[in-house]
Image (cartoon, helix red, strand yellow):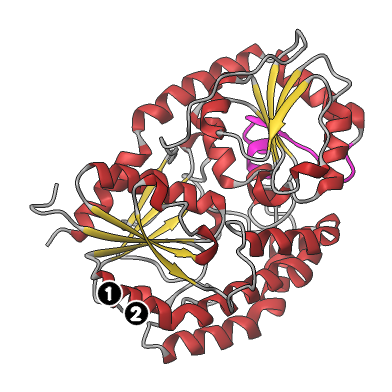
């Protein structure tokens, strides 16, 4: 513990996954007596303050005329680009991945003056960023900078692992072609962003990387599915086997008709905006003997559940996953690591970005099944359900792994690293 309380400034991406990850770590630090401040995108106004944190709001674009829900920009983006998710990951580089980088860059440019003002006003002892894009103000503040990788473990690249966003298998097939196409589609965008970053006084970015490494780096991924043998981490990196917040409200399991297993279905706050996909999955699950808890997401009013289901717009995921037998997920890093934290097998239906990589890793390490999100048959989904629920050996292995992940206590390990790097 430092000799005196620290002022710690968190800046997460404006999405529930990174924000919830920072909330979990920040809550531990706050309880240790530190001052924890969030530089949060403006749509989060009041949400973090209610959890006991200070808020400093930033705009990633000109303010909307009407108040928006948290992360509304990305919900709209996902809804509008949903047809592109039916394409291969190689094709998505041009139509999904590149536009996401461009939107992130626009946000970084827009909020740079606000961030500099916030840093001057807050006077942090350490800055923690959980995002995939560089904000020059965060690395030129003259205090230690901590990077969190909680989105995609393949952000930390290496010759022995598949390229990020590809969802390619570990056998190396297609890696060179994907890397070449990534270079072709992203080189110009990266070069312009790197020039702007250095103009702001920050160090140059590594080649084709959109964010700097930190003085300390935290990386969220359980060892049971990690790439430890193929891509060792450097000395500045600390793996957190999980980072599961402890701030979710208590949950009482509702009475759901049925005698089968209990399954949690969530495509995340962004993926659930694809209402047609939500309805397709629900229609298949409705014909099984199992019971389901469904995270319906921002367009919840457009999603009708079957009698063997209960759901809501928001559900306390970290309280629900321990109660269920299996998780059906989009493969977002938060849900993937939380499912393994509680020792649950998964069915993955990836849509974009990191989700393909997590889905592939779930599949090839045997802790779950990856399905083709838009082309799976009814029998493929129900067969995966039955196979995973009936595999007693897998469930026993995952229960044991979950116990070890929880014992390693990623939240407090992360807090220790942040305190240590900030200590005078």
Q: Residue furthest top?
A: 259
218 with respect to 86 (left or right)? left
Q: What stretch is highlighted in magenta?
A: 360-376
> Which residue is at a point 36% across and 88% down the rendered structure image?
201
What residue is pinned by disc 1? 121
x, y percent for residue 379: 90, 27
> Which residue is at a point 77% across and 64% down the rendered structure image?
92
Badge 1: few (under 14), some or many (20 or more) residues near its Cα, within 10 Å?
few
x, y percent for residue 210: 52, 73
Cα–Cα span, label 2 and label 1 = 6 Å
> Which residue is at a point 60% across and 64% down the rendered structure image?
67
Q: In this view, does 177 lie above or below 374?
A: below
Q: Is residue 370 magenta?
A: yes
Q: What element carries label 1?
A: helix
x, y percent for residue 329: 68, 38
* Residue 394 occupies quadrant: top right
Badge 2: few (under 14), some or many (20 or more) residues near its Cα, within 10 Å?
few
Q: In this view, does 52 lie above or below 398?
A: below
* Residue 37 occupies quadrant: bottom left
In this view, the residue in front, 309 or 284, is 309
What residue is pinned by disc 2? 117
The answer to whether the residues at label 2 and label 1 have Cβ atoms under 8 Å apart is: yes
């Amino acid at each position: 513990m430092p000799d005196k309380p620290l002022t710690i400034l968190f800046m997460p991406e404006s999405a529930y996954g990174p924000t919830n990850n920072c909330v979990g770590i920040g809550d531990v630090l706050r309880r240790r007596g530190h001052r924890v401040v969030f530089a949060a995108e403006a749509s989060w106004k009041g949400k973090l303050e209610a959890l006991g944190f200070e808020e400093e709001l930033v705009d990633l674009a000109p303010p909307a005329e009407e108040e928006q829900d948290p992360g509304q920009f990305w919900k709209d983006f996902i809804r509008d680009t949903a047809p592109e998710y039916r394409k291969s990951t190689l094709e998505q580089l041009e139509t999904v991945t590149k536009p996401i980088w461009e939107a992130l860059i626009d946000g970084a440019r827009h909020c740079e003056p606000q961030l500099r003002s916030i840093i001057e006003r807050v006077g942090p002892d350490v800055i923690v960023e959980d995002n995939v894009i560089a904000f020059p103000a965060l690395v030129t503040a003259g205090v230690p900078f901590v990077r969190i990788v909680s989105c995609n473990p393949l952000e930390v690249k290496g010759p022995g692992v598949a390229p990020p966003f590809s969802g390619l298998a570990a056998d190396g097939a297609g890696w060179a072609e994907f890397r070449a196409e990534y270079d072709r589609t992203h080189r110009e965008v990266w070069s312009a962003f790197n020039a702007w970053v250095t103009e702001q006084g920050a160090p140059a970015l590594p080649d084709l990387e959109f964010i700097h490494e930190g003085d300390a780096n935290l990386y969220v991924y359980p060892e049971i599915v990690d790439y430890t043998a193929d891509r060792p981490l450097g000395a500045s990196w600390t793996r957190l086997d999980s980072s599961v917040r402890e701030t979710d409200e208590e949950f009482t399991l509702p009475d759901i008709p049925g005698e089968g297993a209990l399954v949690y279905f969530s495509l995340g706050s962004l993926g659930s905006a694809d209402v047609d996909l939500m309805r397709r999955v629900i229609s298949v699950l409705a014909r099984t003997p199992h019971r389901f808890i469904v995270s319906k997401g921002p367009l919840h009013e457009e999603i009708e559940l079957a009698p063997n289901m209960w759901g809501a717009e928001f559900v306390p995921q970290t309280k629900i996953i321990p109660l269920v037998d299996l998780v059906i997920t989009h493969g977002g890093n938060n849900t993937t690591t939380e499912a393994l934290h509680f020792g649950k097998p998964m069915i993955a239906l990836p849509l974009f970005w990191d989700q393909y990589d997590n889905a592939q890793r779930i599949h090839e390490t045997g802790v779950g099944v990856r399905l083709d999100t838009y082309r799976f048959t009814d029998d493929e989904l129900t067969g995966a359900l039955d196979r995973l629920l009936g595999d007693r050996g897998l469930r026993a292995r995952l229960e044991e792994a979950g116990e070890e992940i929880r014992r390693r206590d990623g939240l407090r390990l992360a807090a220790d690293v942040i305190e240590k790097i900030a200590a005078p």
